[in-house]
Image: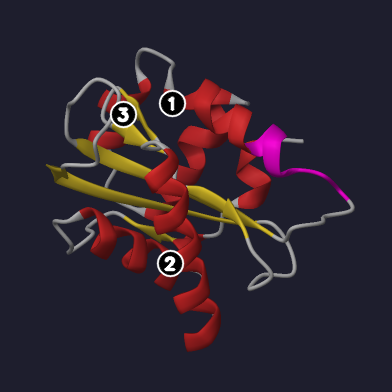
């Protein structure tokens, strides 16, 4: 299993418009192209998850994630906001890179935690934040995932 397998070009936004946490979550969920009810459910679940503790893992990266009946398979998206967003990250720095993961409550393939772990592993590589800042297309993002081979 490779991270690249889970991302598609249409679920990558390199110019998020939002500047506050809740709006960023809405914008990320919007990349999944779900119906309105599913989107509202996911945003609510993600906000609830954030109340348990920020998914901002430091190094300007956040991995908002949840399980919800609103999806029938694991879904991921990537968003970037170069100006940064206050996300209550563990290092108190603004977040520029957002990896969204949502999965159904029960998934046969059980990929939710492995994908979460792989994204964290990818994100913590020393050169990744700089490379994420420089990419200009969704294709370059996907190539970075392939190059890292995680």
Q: Position of residue 56 (x, y in %)?
A: 34, 34
Most foreground residue, 121 or 141: 121
Callout 3 crowding tier (Cα within 10 Å): few <14, some 14–19, many ≥20? few
Question: How far apart in space, not on screen, are marks 1 and 2 (Cα)?
Answer: 23 Å
Frontmost of labels 3 and 1 is 1
Q: Is residue 74 left or right of residue 11?
A: right
Q: Image quadrant of residue 104? A: bottom right
Say how the picture is coloured: secondary structure
Task: Assign a secondary structure to mark 2.
Answer: helix
Q: Which mark is residue 34?
A: none
In which quadrant of the rendered image does the C terminus lie?
top right
Callout 1 crowding tier (Cα within 10 Å): few <14, some 14–19, many ≥20? many
Tell which circle, 3 or 1, labels the residue nearer the N-terminal end: 1
Q: Residue at x 17, y 64 (%)?
A: 17
Frontmost of labels 1 and 2 is 2
The image shows residue 78, relative to residue 38, as above or below, that is above
Task: Assign a secondary structure to mark 1.
Answer: helix
Frontmost of labels 3 and 2 is 2
Residue 95, magenta (yes or no): no
Most foreground residue, 62 or 135: 62
Question: How far apart in space, not on screen, are marks 3 and 2 (Cα)?
Answer: 28 Å
Q: Which residue is mark 2?
A: 43
Q: Position of residue 60 (x, y in %)?
A: 26, 30
Q: Is residue 112 left or right of residue 28?
A: right
Residue range corresponding to the magenta coloring: 109-115
Q: Position of residue 38 (x, y in %)?
A: 55, 79
Q: Residue at x 64, y 64 (%)?
A: 68
Q: Is residue 63 left or right of residue 131?
A: right
Q: Which residue is mark 3?
A: 131
Q: Which residue is mark 1?
A: 123
Q: Is residue 9 left or right of residue 6?
A: left
């Amino acid at each position: 299993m490779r991270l690249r397998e889970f991302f598609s070009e249409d679920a990558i936004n390199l110019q998020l418009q939002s500047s506050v946490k809740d709006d960023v979550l809405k914008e990320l969920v919007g990349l999944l192209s779900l119906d309105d009810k599913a989107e509202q459910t996911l945003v609510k679940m993600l906000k609830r998850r954030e109340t348990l503790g920020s998914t901002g893992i430091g190094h300007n990266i956040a991995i908002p994630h949840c399980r919800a009946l609103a999806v029938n398979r694991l879904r991921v998206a990537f968003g970037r906001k170069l100006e940064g967003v206050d996300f209550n990250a563990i290092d108190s720095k603004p977040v520029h890179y957002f990896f969204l993961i949502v999965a159904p409550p029960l998934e046969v393939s059980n990929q939710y935690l492995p994908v979460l772990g792989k994204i964290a592993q990818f994100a913590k590589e020393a050169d990744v934040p700089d490379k994420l800042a420089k990419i200009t297309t969704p294709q370059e993002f996907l190539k970075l995932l392939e190059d890292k081979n995680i």
